[in-house]
Amino acid sequence: MQDHERDNSALRAAVKTVVCPCCDSVVELPDASEGLQCRCPVCGALLRPAREVPLSHIAVMAFSALLMLVCSLNIPFMSVGAAGVSASMSLATIISVLSQEHLLLGIFVLVTFVFPIYLLAIAMLTGFFAFRPGRMAAKLYSVCHRFTMIDVFVLGVAVSLVKLTQLADVSFHAGFFIAMFFSCILIWCWLRFRPARIWELYRTQQDLQLDSGARGSDQGIVVCRSCGLMYRHQGGESSCPRCGAKNRFRQRMWGQRTAALILAAAVLFLPSNLYPIMFTDYMGSETGSNIVEGVISLWDMGSWFVASVVVLASLFIPAFKILAVSYLMICVKKGSITHPRLLSVLYRIVEFIGKWSMIDVFVVIIMSTAVRMGGLLTISPGMAIVTFCLVVMLTMFAASEFDERLIWDNCAHD
């Protein structure tokens, strides 16, 4: 009998109670040493991965990626030739060519250099030197982690190469392969070293005594939407003890903010697809093409897969995000939610695909850089690239303003 009681007490000690940030349910997790992946039994959200990669391993990979990035800056990336004229380009030359296009230059520098370098630097400091980040360092890491789009850039390079091979002869050099290896390693570090781990290094989550039979908000527990910290909250608005963000059990005016962002994205969606996204000047003859015309051109050239990717990323995904977030808002406002788990899956899809619409932006960047150097053929970005960037950003911000827990608030009595 005493042995049985000791076993039960040991089991209880190994259980950690958390509040799911997606549905506000209280969930008991087994000890992390068991190596079990933990998901919320109510909404299916991932609460804890099966195991964490050691920080020292991540630091080694981050150092390797940083070396590759430095090596690939000035090494020729690829060369483009047409009518006997050939020119090569590197990552550094993209910056010089885009110096007059401030928006595209800023996007390229941030997502290709600034954000990734900061991620890799923090990974190396924590893994090699046991660096404990401060609040500002952790906040900046969260922002860089969210807006690093190196995976989108890689796919944009692939689409650009298919388009360029129809216009000129393209040759690859060492810089291209080094950059691709850098991208793969960076994506691995991005997946293994998420912001939640940084925040735990800054301030560890304290254990809270929670009743698994009631939701977090019913027990006065709020989960910070910025850093994920659970803490007791008396009502109204309070500052998160870890990151300082203002939190409520549910954010005020979420509907107005989300609706305003979605409406702005819907208004800009039309000009971003109707006006030229880039201009092609070949032998003195300039023509503009929008996204639809580019897709038709790819289809006519036989590049059906690439045409499908562009349609999916540039037309379907932005329209899908606008419609999906609008539908979620209507369901929450009406309170007519019969399948909350399906709506949660829909919301997570919107969150996941948010950045992939930026493929066309990177395609324009790569192509305008590559062919401007040839002399015979020049590609320049059009006005629609600005509105298209705004559509992508507005839909991402709208999805962030929407609170997934509102879906489950309407079903709390079930």
Image (cartoon, helix red, strand yellow):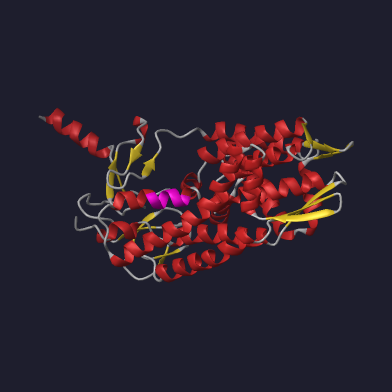
Image location (x, y in percent) of residue 248 = 37, 66
Q: Is residue 334 above or below residue 358?
A: below
Considering every residue shown, the one lying at the far right of the view is: 84
Q: Which residues are magenta?
A: 346-351
Quick one: 215 or 324, which is closer to the camera? 324
Residue 249 in view of the camera: no
Horizontal side of 362 relative to 80 (left or right) equals left
**Image quadrant in which you'd find residue 246:** bottom left
Q: Specify the principal SS of the magenta part.
A: helix
Image height of 158 relative to 387, above or below = above
Seen from the viewer's position, the closer of residues 331 and 279 is 279
Residue 348 forms part of the magenta stretch: yes
Q: Can you give x and y, in whole percent of width and height, for residue 123 in the image? A: 59, 41
Picture quarter with the C terminus: bottom left
Residue situated furthest front in the rendering: 300
Q: Position of residue 244 (x, y in %)?
A: 47, 62
Q: In the displayed structure, does residue 273 sit left or right of residue 278?
A: left
Of all residues, the one furthest to the left in this rendering is: 1
Quadrant of the snapshot with the N terminus: top left
Q: Decide: is 248 above or below 202.
A: below
Residue 113 belongs to magenta span: no
Count of numbered badges drawn on the protein: 0
**Quarter holding residue 175:** top right
Q: Say whether residue 46 is left or right of residue 361.
A: left
The percent coordinates of residue 210 (x first, y second) are 25, 52
Q: Residue at x 67, y 40 (%)?
A: 157
Can residue 404 be seen at all in this image of the molecule? yes
For image coordinates 67% across by 54% down, the residue present is 107
Give me the residue at 79% from left, 59% from top. 100
